[in-house]
Amino acid sequence: MLMTNLNSLAIGEAAVITLLTAEVRLQQQLCALGFRPGRQVSVVRKAGFSGPLHLRMGVTEVMLRRREAQQVYVVSVEPEHDDETDCSVGGAEYR
Amino acid sequence: MKRIAVLGAPNTGKSTFFNRLTGANANIGNWPGITVELAMAHVQLKNEQVEIIDLPGIYDLQGLSEDEAIVRQFLSITPLHLVLIVINTSQIDHQLNLVLQVKHLHLPTVLLLNMADEATTFGVSVNSQKIARNLGIPVVALSAKYGQGYALAYDTIAHALNQQQQPVHLGSLEERRVAESQITEELEGLLQETVEFFTHPQETWTQRLDRVLLHPIWGLPILFGALFLTFQAIYFLAAPWQNWIEVGLHGLKVVVLEPLLAGLPPFPKSFLLEGLYDGVGTVIAFDPLITLFFFGMAVLEDSGYLSRAAFLTDGLMQRLGLDGRSFVMSMRGFGCNLPAVMGIRVMQSTNLRLLSMLILPFSLCPGRLNVFIFITAALFSTTTAPLVLVSLYGFSLAATVLSAFLLKGCFPHQESFILELPPYRFPTFKQVLLRAWYEVHHFLRWSYRFIISGVVLIWLLNHLPWNAPAMSSQTLGGMLGQATQPFMAPIGIDAQLAVTLIFGIFAKEVILGGLTLIYQQMSGATDLMGAIAGQIDWVQAFSFMLFTLLYLPCLSTLALLKSEANSIRFVLMAMVWSLGLAWTSSFIFYQSARALGF
């Protein structure tokens, strides 16, 4: 399974969170809003002018800047994005 | 007296619940050992007197933000009989986190599952009895906004309070802290047992609305259009009130006050009537406008649209070293700079706060607008006057953008910005009214001190020394005006106008009072607008308005900047920057207009 970061997902794509690499403060903010490994998140839209992402987790909707989204690692749940490249980041488990 | 604290995340309707429970009788005040002001109320709950405190909204008891530290500090030093945790039922999957953290503190707790009605529509079904059994605390589902389930919540709280005779004093939270991993494990188990999520095949109306309002191309134009219409509606609705107040105050003066004070010697009589009464009256006339503005903002905020405004503008604001919240605050600044400056407390990075504080005062507030409306009406035709006003809004925006762009290098920061986008909700009239009232109340308390000192000082400067003719160049005010001429003559502002600008530092509204006082007396005419038009031409007038727009924030805002930044140096820097920008803009405009032969 290819691990990628949240920022590289396309609009409408859904993925499961595997790893948060943000610094402590941001990590806590993310956790408080429900970003945890194992949770499914989808990209609803991206704002113009390189603005933030609009994300949905269950019924919670959140805006997250692209820079911060790069610190949230996910695996896509869409099969067509499952190309065979080996992922060296590894180690994170995906249920 | 027993004591209850209300705890919960932002956007859970925690304050709505607090207002319902306390009958909206809360006071904002200091709490011993806590650095920010908290809302608290004393109420009769069944047969007991209780003190209820509304804590800042937090997601996480272990978090690093200022609010989270405040809540921890409060919980550790305050003996409590009961903690009420309010959560948004649809977000129970992550908000139970906070509940579990509090559970491990072993405080007597009641859990309130708020917005239970909304959760059903979102396909979240919660078994509150199972949660109660599992956590060993009373749990009630309710809608604090519409009142369903409230009676049961009230009885449950009263009962729980009755059981608790002695307060619990935690002392230190650290000892009772439980590892994050254990909380997560408990959370997963609890969710599995008590909550069911149904996937919803069809779109909610929030999603449908967002598709239009957050449209990649139309989103921003819709935002600006909506704001423009809101502002227009506010001015349209406030105008008659302003007129009635002016007429009423004038009537009171002629019918009651003048006969009453007829026996006084001329000096104190003139001081009380023309100085204090007229001066404060000019300002009171603007209160409906400001009240309506707060009201409009509260509607936008409670509907959920302001979070969307932050989403839409964040990309642009990021380029200016700011973020979407700064945009929302600047918008509030168009109503009044004070609450805008107060609002930036939510930002964590000091540099981001400082940069926001530097640009917020350039927002064209109603105090300035009224001066502009008055001058444009006196010096421009009815067709050009609105264009002149629009151009001043443009300059306000340009000054904001330019300052942020030029100064962002001095205030580097790495602030992350995550914001919940809550579903759109219909604001209830009562909620909006309450919220607007709090802000109006705060505004009046803060600003009137300065406005009253301002009008009193204007009058004194224009009437002292005793033997000089009032308003003449031999008064202190006249001499002050003359002294400014080396700086002000190159931008077309004469001695009289310069004096009003000095007074305008107290509050921009005072400029209007100053213009009235000076030009009326100078020309002896009753036609004030005609008197002004006879003294200055349109190039001077526009230069004056440009300078008024940018030169300095009012004294209330300066005092607030000082207390928020906690640095007199920063305030001085802000003053130098805005004065420099104002003078340069006016200079360029005035000299080029003259060079072009106007």
Image (spheres, coloured by chain):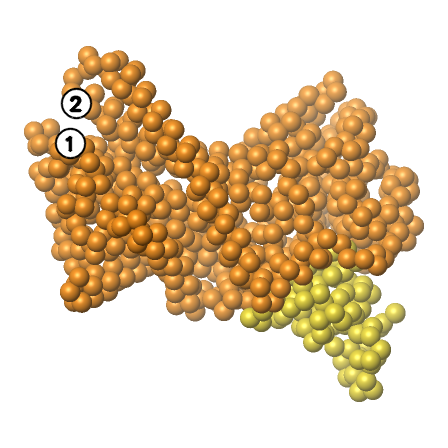
Chain colours: A yellow, B orange
Q: Residue furthest front?
A: B383
Q: Residue furthest bottom?
A: A85
Element on which disc 2 rests: helix
Cβ atoms at labels 2 and 1 below 8 Å apart: yes
| Amino acid residing under circle 2 | Phe
Q: Quadrant of residue B429?
A: top right
- Residue A61: percent from left, percent from top: 71, 58
Marker disc for residue B463:
1
Q: Is residue B148 left or right of residue B557?
A: right
Tell me the quarter of the image containing the N terminus of chain B: top right
Q: Is residue B249 left or right of residue B348?
A: left
- Residue B478: percent from left, percent from top: 13, 41
- Residue B150, can we see it? yes
- Residue B144: percent from left, percent from top: 72, 36
User: Which residue is pictured at 32% across the width and 20% down the height?
Assistant: B252
Q: Pointer 2: what residue?
A: B267
